[in-house]
Amino acid sequence: MFRLNLKIAFRNLIRNRSYTMINILGLSIGMTSCILIFVFIRFQLSYDTHFKNADRIYRFVTDWKYNNFDDYSAGVPIPFAPAAKQELEGIEKIARISRNSGVVLVRNGDGTEHFKAVKDVYFTEADLFDILQVKWLFGKATQSLLEPNTTVISEKTAKAFFGSAQQAIGKSFTFWNSIQLRVVGVIADMPSSSSIPLEIMISYPTFYGNKNQDWDSVSTYNECFVLLKPGASMAVFEQSLERMNDKYLKQKKLAGNQRSHLQALSDIHFSERYGNFAETNITKKEVYGLAIIGLFLMLTACINFINLATAQSVNRSKEVGVRKVMGAMRWQLVFQFLAETTTITVISVLLACIFSELMLPFLSHLFKGEVSLSLFTDPTVFIFLFFLVVVVSFVAGFYPAMIISGFSPALAIKNKVSIKSGNLSLRMILIVIQFSITIVLIVATVVVIRQMQYVRGKPLGFKKDAVVLLGFPGDSASMSRQQLFREKLLHVPGVEKQSYFVRPPLSGMMNTTNFYVDGRENKDFEVRLSPSDEHYFDLFGLQFLTGKVYAKSDTANAYIANETFVKKIGITNPQLALGKVISQNGRTGPIVGVVKDFNDQSLKEKISPMVFYQEKRQYYNMGLKLDPKQIIQTMKEIENLWKSSFPNEVYNAKFIDSDIDKYYESERITGLLFRIFAGVIMFISFIGLFGLVSFVAAQRTREMAIRKVLGATTLELVKMLNSSFIRMVFVANLIAWPLAYILANKWLSGFAYRTSMGLWPFMLAMATSMVITLITVSFRSYRAAKANAVDALKYE
């Protein structure tokens, strides 16, 4: 019976080639997109699931709540972990880890340079390996990283440094040009889906800040992980943590009501507020958004199938009538038509797998290699494909099967079966839903593109054209040569200006603190600190509202504030801010100037209250303003000068424009994905529309021939066929607009500075859908209207 149904299914599909091709094309494209979305979402949800006991692993994080300001950090004070061992109930293991970066230098046996690069390293307590349960290739967790100047590296790092994991044991390399590190262990490479990318782990006793006892000093780079005991009560643990917060934080009256609390390992990758060491976080709302788009894609493809199947059902009426007369039961007919749908679905899935495999490299490239995607390495993909076949076959095939199998045998054999108005209304509803989805994505795409154009075009309040950023060595010898190196740079042809600083004007690197104004503590907000030399303001073209740049002799006792800071401390006239004395972290000095506001973070954030001051020991970066006409040659000479001045360092220069662009990377990807999926849904919708109008035109061939004989013009016939489809698309626009507005407005709310939405994205979506519908329908309608009426009527 099954073989017979399959044979009949293939015969019917081959007989109706155009109908079959349209359905297979629509389903396979929709499934390809759906499979790619599933693989990507599956990868994101797999983050940190490879760790044993992942459900018992947590990270401590820190929050602050001022009167008008909340702040968050993934870090905790360095003395937190030793205190937690004594105070908290239910802890099995607890360990600190501190991220840093610097030049790693590996030499050959003869002293020549083998490897040199700037790498991230992690000063790690040995207990972290018991918490994360990494796989050891060489070395032991209980013995590694207990002594100063020892390191554990990943297998990939071992191969890059020493050729193999085994050869790395006992070898040494240099970090920061001063710390000699001995390799005591090699671990297997961490999966790419890890929020804790451990490649170079240095023993915690080597960390220069490991004895720090300041509970008010919190850095995102200093994290703390804990493994709770099996069956530990979270309620009891939270109570002991609350007591610890009171003892070490509240009683010390730290600024901002500082508190520590737990964050589950499973939440780290999706934490926009706290981030992670891998810097690859994605929010769950973005994951859910992609899942919804995938659902829309399949819904659109299924709607195509249903519309075409019900439209084609009239052509199958005689077959149904004959089979019923011969004794076929309705359930047998339903099974037959579901078999045809399943056949189309299986073919579509096979094609979709081929298309997906071809598209996976593009998807990985879209995320700049940060995600590792593969179609068939994860068994859940096969489960998903099976689920996809079953659901699509049922959703797309059940309703048409019930309609076709329900035809009356007598009417079917006489060829007097027609699709009732109710079924026609359902097809109209499905078309409206299909086009509503398309229009929502068109509006969303336009809004995303427009916002990104606004982000790139908005004046940020500082000059960034032809400005190059370079890191500067942090050792004392290099710091003592700052002025000499500056003079050499200014003699390079094409270098116009130069400045030393901690961070450029727009930077995600935050350093905020509480402060005093004229001896009065401020409890409303924290101020962002930006140590910069006296040339900083000229280099970036920052405008002074009042006052002046601090003189070079003002190293220890002068501040420049921005406009927002002045307003937040209650001063409306910037002139009145001059002379106000600011105290923070042991540094006291007057405000000598006020600069006009500029965007110090991405346009997702509001402008921070900021102060600038001089601190030569913290200038780890510098900026150069170049002559745009000599950039290529000037960059070569700067590199040569750098390498001759700092032979043990790694040269790394980047233009500030590219540095700013990285803050909108997720929005760039969102915009591209919206464009792709909007295009896919539009394509699926319009090939379905073309198939449907082709069938309608074929069904009404004799009607049009009679109208033509009675004097109807070609234009009138085209208009007759077009009118119902145009009305449906118009209704779809009216339905889609409110939903599109809500979604687009919600996305824009993530930006502190955003473009106005306006009416034109909606009008553009309407015009696009109307024009493409008109072209699609008119092309097929015109062919039908131009057909020879004699050919249609000669058998009547």
Image (cartoon, helix red, strand yellow):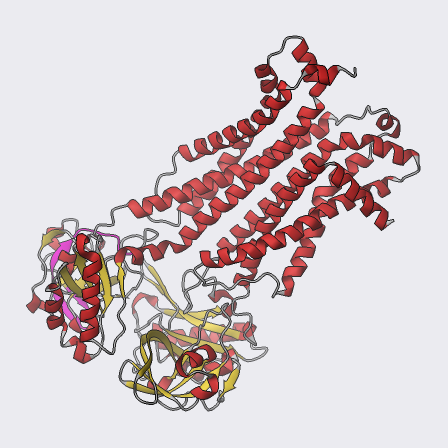
Tell how many labels. 0
Q: Nearer the viewer, residue 366 or 714?
A: 714
Judge left or right: residue 247 versus residue 388: left
Residue 675 is a magenta residue: no
Instruction: State the image coordinates of residue 548 (x, y, percent, origin top left).
Output: 8, 57
Q: Describe residue 29's horizontal placement relative to residue 539 as left or right.
A: right
Name the residue located 58 percent from the left edge and 44 percent from the top edge: 296
In this rendering, does residue 583 appear at all? Answer: yes
Q: What quarter of the picture does the C terminus occupy?
A: top right
* Magenta stretch prevailing secondary structure: strand
Along the line of sight, which residue is nearer the eye, 351 or 139? 351
For residue 424, what is the image quadrant?
top right
Q: Quadrant of residue 549?
A: bottom left
Q: Is residue 562 above or below residue 740?
A: below
User: Is 260 above or below relative to 367?
Assistant: below
Residue 28: horizontal and vertical position, in percent?
A: 63, 47
- Depth check: 115 or 339 in front? 115
Q: Residue at x 34, y 49 (%)?
A: 752
As drawn, 258 above or below 126: above
Give the magenta-colored segment's residue range: 582-601
In this rendering, the answer to whether 170 lies above or below 196 is below
At a point 74% along the width and 37% down the height, the residue shown is 400
Looking at the rendering, which quadrant does residue 404 occupy?
A: top right
Question: Is residue 283 shown left or right of residue 502?
Answer: right
| Magenta-drawn stretch contains 584 | yes
Query: In this image, 310 relative to 495: left or right?
Result: right
User: Residue 5, position in %: x, y?
Assistant: 83, 46
Residue projecting furthest to the top = 710
Is residue 87 in view from this perspective?
A: no
**Residue 635 x/y as whole percent:** 21, 62
At 49% from the left and 82% from the top, the residue drawn is 187
